Amino acid sequence: MRRSVALLAVVIVTGSLVLGVWAGPAAGQSGGGATDLTLEQLRPNGQHPANAPPSVRAAGSYSEYAVKDLPTGLLVQEGEESPSWRYLRKGTTVNRDKLQLWSKRGYSAEQKEVIVRVAYWTTKTRTVTTDDGSSREETIARNVSTHSTQATLGPGYDYLTINLRSHFDTKRNAVMCVQEPEEANCLENPGETRWRFQHQTSATSKAAPVNSLGGQLAWGYGWLVLPFFGVASVTLYGGRIFVRRAKSPPNISPIWYVVGAIIVVLFLILGWDWVSNTLATAPWLISAVAGIILGIMAVEWFSSETYNALFLRFSLTDGDPDPVGSPPGDGGARADGGEAELGVGEPRRPDDAPGVLSADAVPIPFARGEDGIRTAVRDGLRRWWARARGARADFKPDGNMQTRIEVDKGPYEELYLLHPEDEEPLQYQPEHHELTLPELIEHEEVEVDTEEGVETTTQRRVHLRPYLLGIGWLGASAGIGKLLAQSPILGLLLGAGALTAVKIARPISGELSANLAPLHYHRALATMLTHADGLSEAKAWDTLFRDLAEERAENKADKAELRDEQSTSQLDQLFDRFTGEGPVGRVSNGESKEEAPADD
């Protein structure tokens, strides 16, 4: 018996507390429930005085009312005294559960009791049959609900905060009116002091469910700290696995981070209502996004298994050291092979030497796979994701690998010499993705044994499983987004992105082919370098032309001497050799000789 009495007392006390808490927020308001107001009673919007700001309504001599609302936006300042409050304009959708009703009266006027009534409704079209049998469409008001607030306005400028009912799911038509206590119901009898608008509560205007410092700490720890560390840990662990498969981090260019930041800012400005509603409903999304970004940036610091290789292609361009048709006096050699005039003309530069040794250098990062094959690696998130899923760009040389040079020091570990006569000795196609949808109908040729022999027929097979699974995945993503973030669109976008990255985008391998130099190319290279070194000794055109002119003059003198020697008889040569006698003043190699007198 005592236990029953005690239990009854507990139930009564608990019920009293619950009723007190429930009735607390409703203090100062009355009314509610469905009413029989018609659309003709709800549609009027009051009388707006000419040249007055929006939402101003006349309230007698030297008096007026005005309604203001506080918008929701990225740069809106919160608070009752915020300068962001603005006059309510026609056709505006109010996204908060409160409005401000301002009054302007004489400073010597007395306080005034007013009743503010608000009605909400939706519309519906129905078919009405008239007495003559014809039918017509008419719009009626449905789901009508009302509430009222009684308050006191002081003289001068004064305002009231009018609380509205929450409508998170659907947009409602609303009308608000002001009347004095002794006047008739202003909703049933439309007057001048009325305001029409639409109302849909934004999640950002909802009060936070904490009222203590301990509650704020628990809310922040549970909705911000834990999701951040959880998502960041998962991203780092998955990133390490994918980096190991791809042999290197994605190495995203910093310009993409800047572009991403600009896109995020523009998206916040243009779609702030949707973003704010989503984040207010699921604040853990902020921590999740921050954890993912931190994880992606940290993946860039993971160790890489790549090394640098350099591909070189040498080429030598020879000039013409004999300027045919040069005018006299320009420092060139004469056409007859004589000495050139030196010291005439402008000086030449050392760069004017007629031989240039050029080289095309292409650095490419390499990584060795598990099978030992060299694979080219290129930076980029998409190529990194393709390598992580198994795509490769293997190195396939066309030539002798003995032309590879091992480098002991420097930024390159290997050096490859390309064929000097090939204009495009290096062909590189990196790994990439290809967007492919699974085939819905597959055609297959089947051989069938018949009485006449073997015939080939075509059979069709319908593959609905990939499409059914894909549609089911998208539906589940939208449902999860609705459950966790109250946004099926967000869930659908994330699900579609994951489906595209994993199933629709198929990784395609690339290839790196190089036409390497022949086996004995090092000897030809040494000869070419020696020739280039000889050309480099020509410091100016004048020096080169003087050497050529001297060489031609010497060759001409040698040829003249040979002709003189050929004209001398063998007898004279023998007489000169044994007696020492001969003509006086014979010229030999440009030098005169005197013969000794003969003995008697």
Image (cartoon, rainbow, N blue to C red):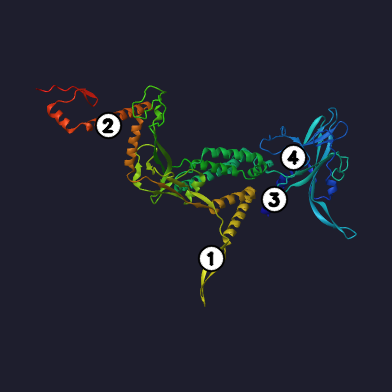
Count of numbered marks: 4
Q: Residue at x 69, y 50 (%)?
A: 11
Asked if 398 appears above or below 359 in the picture, the reply is below
Element at label 1 = strand
Identify the mark nearer the N-term, 2 or 1: 1
- Residue placed under numbered mark 3 in the picture: 11
Identify the mark nearer the N-term, 1 or 3: 3
The answer to whether the residues at label 1 and label 4 have Cβ atoms under 8 Å apart is: no
Q: Residue at x 56, y 56 (%)?
A: 437
Q: Residue at x 65, y 39 (%)?
A: 269
Q: Is residue 148 left or right of residue 242?
A: right
Identify the mark nearer the N-term, 2 or 3: 3
Q: Is residue 402 left or right of residue 77?
A: left
Q: Is residue 37 visible?
A: no
- Residue placed under numbered mark 2 in the picture: 559
Q: Between marks 3 and 4, how big is the CA–CA gap?
A: 35 Å
Element at label 3 = helix
Q: Between marks 1 and 4, how big is the CA–CA gap?
A: 67 Å
Residue closest to the eye, 590 or 500: 590
- Residue placed under numbered mark 4 in the picture: 98
> Disc 3 vs disc 4: which is toward the camera?
4
> Disc 4 vs disc 2: which is toward the camera?
2
